[in-house]
Structures are given as C-alpha cells and as structure tokens.
Image: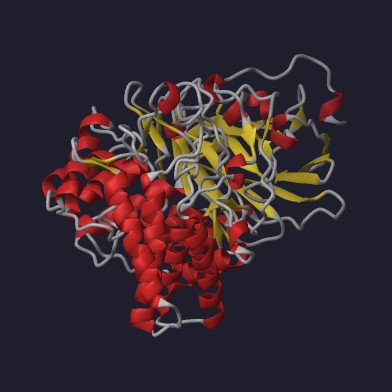
Amino acid sequence: MSDAAVSGPPPGDGCPSPIEDYALIGDLHTAALVGRNGSIDWLCLPRFDSGACFAALLGSERHGRWLIAPEGEVVGTNRRYRDGTLVLETDFATAEGAVRLVDCMAIKGHGRTLVRAVEGLRGEVKMRMELVIRFDYGSTIPWVEHGEEEMSAVAGPDAVYMRTEVDSRGENMRTVAEFTVREGEDIPFTLTWGPSHKPAPDALDGLWAIRDTESWWREWSGSCAFSGEYADEVLRSLIVLKALTYLPTGGIIAAPTTSLPEAIGGERNWDYRYCWLRDAVLTLDALMLGGFIQEALDFGAWVLRATASHPSQTQVLYGVSGERRLIEYELDHLPGYEGSAPVRVGNAAANQFQLDVFGEVLDAAYRGREMTGQLVKEGWDRQRGMLDYLEEIWREPDEGIWEVRGPRRHFTHSKVMAWVGFDRAVKTVERRGADGDVEHWRRIRDEIHEQVCDQGYDSERNTFTQYYGSKELDASTLLIPAVGFLPPDDARVIGTIDAIQSELAPDGWVRRYSTGEGEDEVDGLQGEEGAFLPCSFWLADALAMAGRTGEARRLFERLLGLTNDVGLISEEYDPGRERLIGNFPQAFTHLTLINTASLLGGDHGQVL
C-alpha cells in the first residue's frame, strides 16, 4: 500500500534544532545534517546541489526527515566523531538503559547510501524510527511500497530504498517502526538513492559500510601533515573541507545548505551549495598546510576548467561541475529556518561583476606554480589573457566581495585584489622566467597602489574605507597586509585595525561592513546580519602580523569557543542570542580557522 494513499492530518510541525545542534556526515558527493535528537533534517540527493529529500531544516518534519531515537524520555545525550573520521556517534541514556546511534554516508557502494545503526550499550531501550521522504525540497510526496526488508519511495526521477530487518509500516504518509535494542545488539538501517528508471541498487551491509567508511576516513586523515599547536582543530576543519569536496570534479562547495539565515527572521538567506572562486587561495593554502597536495591540485584543476572561457565571462561562483547557470528562485512552500524567508535555490551573485575574483584566480594560479615549481604554458597564456582584460576593467565600479545588491561602487578591497593580480604576474616573470611585459604590469600595479592609498584611505581617521570617498568601513581591508599590499606594521594598516575593532566589532565580533544610509546605503537589503566569523579570524591574523600576538591569540581562542560540540562552525554568529547563524558548516570559516591556527601555532603556513 502506498503511504500517499493514506488519508489523515499531516505530520506534526516540529521546529528544526538550533544550527549548532547539527553534525555533518557525507560521502564526497552530498552531505546530511544530523541533529542531537537523532533526526536527519537535511539531505540533498544525489549531489550537493540536488533537491532535498529531507528539508525539515527549513520548515518542519512534514518537509522530510529521518528520526531514530528512544521512544521514551532521554535523560542524557553525548556525541562525538570517531577520531579522524566523519563517522558520528550519538549516545542516548534513558531510565531503562543506553544506546548508541552511529551515522555515516558510505564512501563505497552503489548509489548514495546513508547508513544508521543502533547499538545497545546497557539494559534495553525502546526505540522509534520515523522516515518522512519528501522530494524536491519537501514538496513532493513519493509513492511508497513496503516489502519484507525493503521500503521503496519513488517520485519522478528519484527513488530511495530503506533496508532493515526491523518491521516498518506506513502511517499517515510516513514510514514508522518501533523496536527494542538490548545490550550487545547492533541494528542497522540503510537508505540508498538511485535513478527511478533503473533497477534498485544492490543492498549494502550497513555494519560493514560503517567499518569501511571509518577505515577510509582514518587512512585519509592519517596523512595530515599539520603538526602545529592547534592540530586537532585543524584536522577537524580539514575533514570538513574534504567532506565538502565533490569527488568527480574536485570542486569544493561553500556549505552543504541553503538559506540558513544571517539574521533569524530576516531575508538575508542564500544558497551556498556552489563553488566560489574567491575561496580558491584560502583553499589551496589550507590543503597545502595539511599536506593534501592531490586535493590542492584537483581543486586547482577545477578552477582552471571552470574559468576556461573569455575572461569577460568569468563568474564569481560555479556549480560543482563548473555549471554557469545558477538561476536564483524562491521556494514559497517552505517557511524558512525559524521563519526566515524567503528560501532560495540558486544564487544570482553568479551574474554579478566582482572585480576582486580576477586577483584571486591569478593569485591561486601563482600559489599553484609555487607549490609545483612548474610553469604550464597553456595556463600562463590564459592568465595573460585575464591580465589583459583586468587592465581594461580595473577602473570600473563593481558589486564587491560581499555580493551586495545595492549600487556598484569603487570598493577598496576590489582594487587591492586587482593590484594582487598584476603583482603576482610580475612575480611570475621574476621568479619563473615567464614571458610577459613585466614593465607594463609594474606600471599598472604602481598606479593601482597609488590610487587605493589616495582614494580608499581616510587620512583624517587613519583608516582604509569600504569604497572610494566613503566614511563606511569594511572588514575586507584587514586583508591589505595579508596579500602584501602594505607591510603589517604600516601606520595605515594599524589605523585600519583599530578602526574596525572600534566600529565593526563593538562586542569583539567583527561585522563585514557598515551599510550606511540613504545614498550611502550599500547592500540593498532589509535588516542586519550577525558577526561574520571569517572576518574575526582575519582580525586575529592582522593583529598577529602586526605583532599584537596576545590580542590575536585571545580572539582566536574565543572563536574556537564558538565551534559546536563536534568542532563545526557556521558562517556567522548572533552575539545577542549567542547562537550560530548562517549556512553550516561553512568552508570559508573553517578555511580561515586553519590559516589562523597556522599563523599562531608556529607552523610554516601563510594566510591569504
């Protein structure tokens, strides 16, 4: 009998958990978020940017989730990742006993497979399983059929198969089961996706899959070369970075989620399941710090393929396979995380003109050459073409690093990154003997430098500003010493640090920018956002580079205190609510964590 044929009221309207209550599991194709309560509330199949079959994160349980938890009262919960892995253990204690829920996504096997297993630790515990599958971001109820050990759910192109020895049944358009786990027992469940027009994928032994996946992650993390003071935190962040890698192409997404709000109840909700060129340099640095050279090369190759077009067609972000059309639209049927609407799919920022990305691509290519010691003629020819185009456009206003949706401006950071592009070209000629009009590039580099120092700097306040002629501040100017534009002890750099601490970080957490009012209003959006965590890491970097190591270390330790109980961190932080906000977990934040740890921990890394 089909669950879709069962009449009755819809499932309950339980709210999603706080963002910090989620843990990440993944298989290098897609990822899921698992709550402390045993509910998987977010999963896109078959890849990161596919439609979600569990979307309770952006609505309620009726939009799809998979719960496995004790049926009665839970008196204690504790969880952890198995060392060096993305295999999650959650222990539930009840008055009658204790169980362990083990969650992972199988690295090997046919189709994308989510694996869950309940282990009896002591006594006996009555458990409940509730599976609510809703394809296409919670909007499509599938046709469900139950067999002896398999449940299938099909709708359009998608099919999933839940396999277990536990008896399950359809109830009110859900699949449910009650079972008892006793000490020493292991009860596995698997959920496998496959195209609906093909036969069901072969069954996967759940307990074997957990062991195999644990072994794979241990082998991978065992090759980590980072040995600094914050080695545990760096390894966890590198595991997150690996988990956000799309294995077939080497692309690395910004986050596995969409529309987790920058302010609870606000409209600043964006889809981050794509690959940003801006993250390229940070990513290469972080992977090299960890000794993961092949991953760095794979991501560098992805960047080269994604940008293989006329330089004028270079985008800010791409799909995991290099897709260019990332049309943004809204999902009206989802109320949004804690009522934060709209929920968006796609990202219109792909069509913006952001001058800084050219500098970041050229810097990433430079880092790649320094890493390999090789100058590839084809790549250098394409970069020279990008330099020719950058020469034409660097004087133009743009939307800037933060993808604002207000008017274009002459953003200071954008001009600094244009300088970076020409600077890295000059260094490539000087260090690698590359062909190019180095004297011409030096003149452009010097012209940009002079213009930024003249028009992007407020001498009265002794600080670089958000854009030319502005009184507003922007945390991206903290990167001026990191990219080599000015020495870290330059008075203008010190003044910028102090101004940002005073005006953008009144409570110690750095906001991205001040928005201004009227004609000076920058981003074209309503409301405010929280503290942008990568900017706080940038502040720690700038302080450390300026010799203010004690301040830098105190800030870094505070930032580490924001990671959740399994070491994950989001894009932003709400100091008033004392909650993580924004898409989660955020690659950009974990990348900056790695680089700051290297800077403070005495390793031989380098920030952006």
User: Is 55 situated above or below 103?
Assistant: above
Q: Residue 280: x percent and y percent?
A: 46, 59
Task: Report whether 298 appears left or right of 567.
Answer: right
Q: What residue is drawn where x is 41% and y is 50%? A: 414
Q: Nearer the viewer, residue 107 or 461?
A: 461
Residue furthest to the top: 9
Quarter of the figure with the C terminus: bottom left
Q: Quadrant of residue 499?
A: top left
Residue 279 falls in image quadrant: bottom left
Colour pattern of the rendering: secondary structure
Q: Is residue 53 left or right of residue 95?
A: right
Q: Is residue 456 above or below residue 514?
A: below
Which of 418/512 is in front?
418
Residue 223 on image: x %, y %? 39, 70
**Left or right placement of residue 422 versus residue 483 in this view:** right
Residue at 79% in and 45% down: 159
Residue 98 seen from this side: no
- Nearest the viewer among 600 and 186 is 600
